[in-house]
Image (cartoon, rainbow, N blue to C red):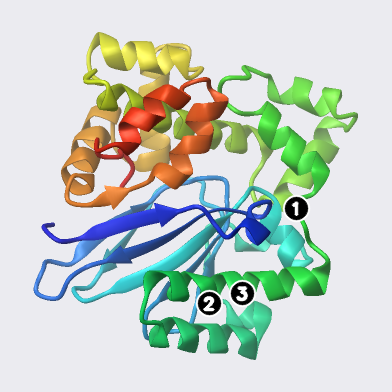
Amino acid sequence: MAGQTYTERPPAPRLAALVTTTWVQRIPPGTPAYPQRHLPTGGVELRCVVGYEPRVAGALTGPHVELLAPGTTVVGLRFRPGAAAAVLGRPVADLTEVVVDAADLWGTAAAAAGERVAAATTDEAAVAALEDLVAAAAVRTGATAPEPLIAEATRRLMPWRGAEVRAVGTELYVSERGFRRHCLAGVGIAPKALQRILRFQGFLARTQAAMATGTEPSGDGLARLAVDTGYADQAHLTRECVRLTGVTPRVFLRGAADTCACGHDHSASYAPLLRAAGLAGSFKNAAGGAPSLTA
């Protein structure tokens, strides 16, 4: 995997309320094909393989492995939970677990964005092409942020909040059935699935912070991180990790450490999670050189 890189950056300020992160991933020519393990994040993604038109990937509920050929460069961005529905001006439940051509949603504007990505001479210009596509779509639908109910529900379902799904719906003055309907339309997945995904993302962020301070996330360390993130115990974490990644935590983290050490930067995804959990200082250490732990 030498030379294979993945670098995240925050979105342009104009899209910060709709997009969590942007990225550029490169698989150098002459290297083996790279098995990219896409994990559930709660967000819809817009991805563009350089030389092709952009595609939209709906929210995942489990892992999906995509083999990236040598010489491939992928430019992408990830929407906040609920933001894609606002930008598209339509429910996204039919996008769950599927990938569609962006042209099916945005017509010739998507093809033009793909051409701009291919012609870009810098990472910034390539990312800007996708950001402009999203910004134009947001203007057409009047989207400035996810639906308030979804945004607040996402905040309350974060792992450090420890809220019960049913209680969150009650606190937001929506019935259990209505809460589920809102989440399926806005995010593409049910509230309980969203909570599972957010909790696992929180676990990965805490693992990154632990690794950055020299703590090995195994044995008692892994058990402690599991409880700190909201899992009942390490066995609970293991079950959820297998559900969301396809492998056990130890296997996943070992593989992620091996691949991410070659040049992955996931700081844009994990910084907000760590700050919200009160671990901003740990993140500063992580951003200073320790490999991030998502593949």
- Residue on which disc 1 sits: 145
Mark-to-mark CA distance, 3 and 2: 5 Å
Indicate whether 222 appears above or below 123. above
Counting residues from the start of the chain, the first of labels 1 and 3 encountered is 3
- Residue on which disc 2 sits: 129
Say which element carries label 3.
Answer: helix
- Residue 140 image offset from top left, x and y in percent: 80, 75
Is label 3 in contact with label 2 (beta carbons under 8 Å)? Answer: yes
- The residue carrying pointer 2 sits among few (fewer than 14), some (14 to 19) or many (20 or more) residues within 10 Å by Cα, namely many
- Residue on which disc 3 sits: 132
Kindly identify the amino acid type of the residue bearing the numbered disc 1.
Answer: Ala
Left or right, 128 with respect to 238, comes to right
Q: Could you tell me which quadrant the N terminus lies in?
A: bottom left
Kindly identify the amino acid type of the residue bearing the numbered disc 2.
Answer: Ala
Say which element carries label 2.
Answer: helix
- Residue 267 image offset from top left, x and y in percent: 40, 43
Counting residues from the start of the chain, the first of labels 2 and 1 encountered is 2
